Amino acid sequence: MNMQEAAEKITYQGVAPWMIPVFILVGIVLCVAIAAVWKVVEISRGEKKRKHDEMTAIAEGVVQAKVNTLAEDISQKVAANMQKKFEEIDQKLDTDKRRLEQTEKRSDAHDKALERIEATLESVDANVKDLHDGFTCMTRGTIATINQLLHNGNQEELESAANELNRYLTSRPIVPMQQGRREAK
């Protein structure tokens, strides 16, 4: 089919032969226009994506900077609070240490006083035992004297009581005096 037959067919359908190149040209122009619009849309989408990525990066940077600032502020506040708590604990420990030292001093003083009291009690016990022994000897001597007077002639009993009283008085141990009394005098 040649151009003329094609033109006749087209003319037959109501299209003039000169319109075919115009239609082809218009088709090419439309294709180019569509391609150009498509390219502009792609560029626009790319630019929009680039701006979105930039804004996201900027926003992430701002958020990260804000998070870092907040984290640093929180860290500083926590560190300050912890330092304050540690100082309070140190003060309490110092106070408790001083109280413990005072308690230990009082305990040492009480221990020394208790030792003095125990020494005094030992001395008193020794003196009481000594007095008991002396009263026992004197009582025997007195009973022997009374028996001598009553029985007239119980010489052995009287001599035994006298010897026992003599032994007690001459060989009597010296009981040491308590230190507290010596210091007081």
Image (cartoon, rainbow, N blue to C red):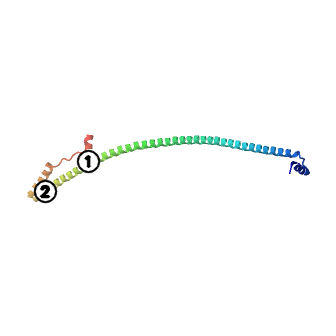
Q: Whole-Å distance between the Cαs marked 1 and 2?
A: 37 Å
**Quick one: SS at disc 1?**
helix
Q: Is residue 149 left or right of residue 118?
A: left
Q: Is residue 140 left or right of residue 43?
A: left
Amino acid tagged 2: Ala
Counting residues from the start of the chain, the first of labels 1 and 2 encountered is 1
Tell us which disc is closer to us: 1 or 2: 1
Seen from the viewer's position, the closer of residues 1 and 128 is: 1
Q: Position of residue 105 (x, y in %)?
A: 35, 43
Q: Is residue 147 above or below residue 107?
A: below
Amino acid tagged 1: Ala
Q: Residue furthest bottom?
A: 151
Which quadrant would the C terminus be assigned to in this image?
A: top left
Q: Is residue 26 left or right of residue 61?
A: right
Q: Which residue is mark 2?
A: 144
Q: Which residue is mark 1?
A: 119
Q: Position of residue 167 (x, y in %)?
A: 13, 51
* Number of numbered discs: 2
How packed mark 2 is, by other alpha carbons closer than 10 Å (few <14, some 14-19, many 20 or more), is many
Q: Residue at x 26, y 40 (%)?
A: 183
Q: Residue at x 24, y 50 (%)?
A: 122
How packed mark 1 is, by other alpha carbons closer than 10 Å (few <14, some 14-19, many 20 or more), is some
